[in-house]
Amino acid sequence: MVYFESNNNIHKLTVSLLAFNLLILVGARTSSYYSTQHSINELLFPLVTVINFVIALLFYLWMSRIESLQREAQLHKISLYSVEEAMRTMRSERHDFINHLQAIYGLIAVGNNEEAANYLKSMGADYRFNSQLLTINNPYLRTLLQNKKQDLFMQGIDLIIEVNSRLEHFILKPMSITTIFGNLIDNATEAIKATDVIEKKEIRFEIHQTKNYYSFLVIDSAPPISQEITHRIFDSGFSTKGENRGYGLALVKQTLKEYRGDIVYDPGIKAFNVTIPK
């Protein structure tokens, strides 16, 4: 969004300069019409107009180049951060791996083979999650998912991610990422906690892409939303949870509009589907 705002400012400035040139040209022709010194005016004013036009064009090209370099620098910064984060994660996993082996050995040594198998299964899920997480090229979304994973684990809910896109050209403000995906995961968490008869408490977060769009699915194991209210769930203030609730999904939809994105609820797979243009 910062890029688009800056780009619009450049366009406005360029249009202003070109409009100024046009006014000078009109003034020059008017002045030459009423002036007795036709030769001087006809040479001077068009020359000034051409010079101003060239200056405006060069200024526009210069600012465009600066913006391009700024975008490249930001992408390099994000890439460097991603590499550093991946190294920290691998060092942490290597350190934990030894502790996990010792725990598994202890369980087997005392004959708790079933507990050892469950421990291994839990380890595999954690390593798969981290492996998928590191393929996401956006550090803010990675951090959000990592934090949500830990919070949900404390509540007895599994967060499973499936990443089919690195999001290499995915540019959203950090606050927008938190607003959109944080609210959707929180909404899924509340739906699961509101239902007592769920054998498997889990939330799936999937990332896909097409030629022109990024697609995000948030799926929970709670019962689907009633079809009678699906057309109202994005209305501000609408909630089945009482007063002063029902603003999360409305805020998600409003934030997505800033990026020309959209969100729909698919009752067939019990998923919120977010689409954002590339």
Image (spheres, rainbow, N blue to C red):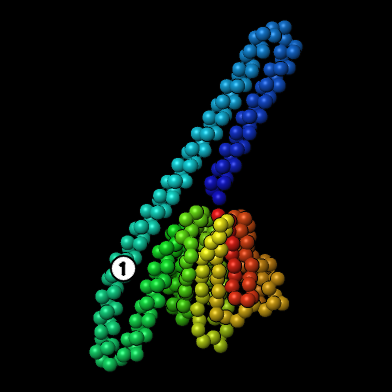
Report which quarter residue 261 is drawn in. Answer: bottom right
Q: Where residue 161 sits: x, y (%)?
A: 47, 71
Foreground: 277 or 173? 277
Q: Where residue 143 sits: x, y (%)?
A: 44, 64
Q: Where residue 232 sits: x, y (%)?
A: 70, 70
**Is residue 38 rendered to the left or right of residue 134?**
right
Amino acid bearing label 1: Ser
**Is residue 250 visible from the viewing direction of this image?**
yes
Q: Where residue 25 sits: x, y (%)?
A: 68, 21
Which residue has dot 1 on it? Answer: 92
Position of the C terminus, as image quadrant, is: bottom right
Identify the residue at horizontal 60%, vertical 38% (top origin).
11
Identify the residue at horizontal 56%, vertical 57% (top origin).
211
Identify the residue at horizontal 66%, vertical 12% (top origin).
41
**Is residue 196 rendered to the left or right of residue 168?**
right
Foreground: 193 or 102? 102
What residue occupies the far bottom of the structure in this picture? 111
- Residue 252 to residue 278: above or below: below
**Is residue 242 visible from the viewing direction of this image?**
no
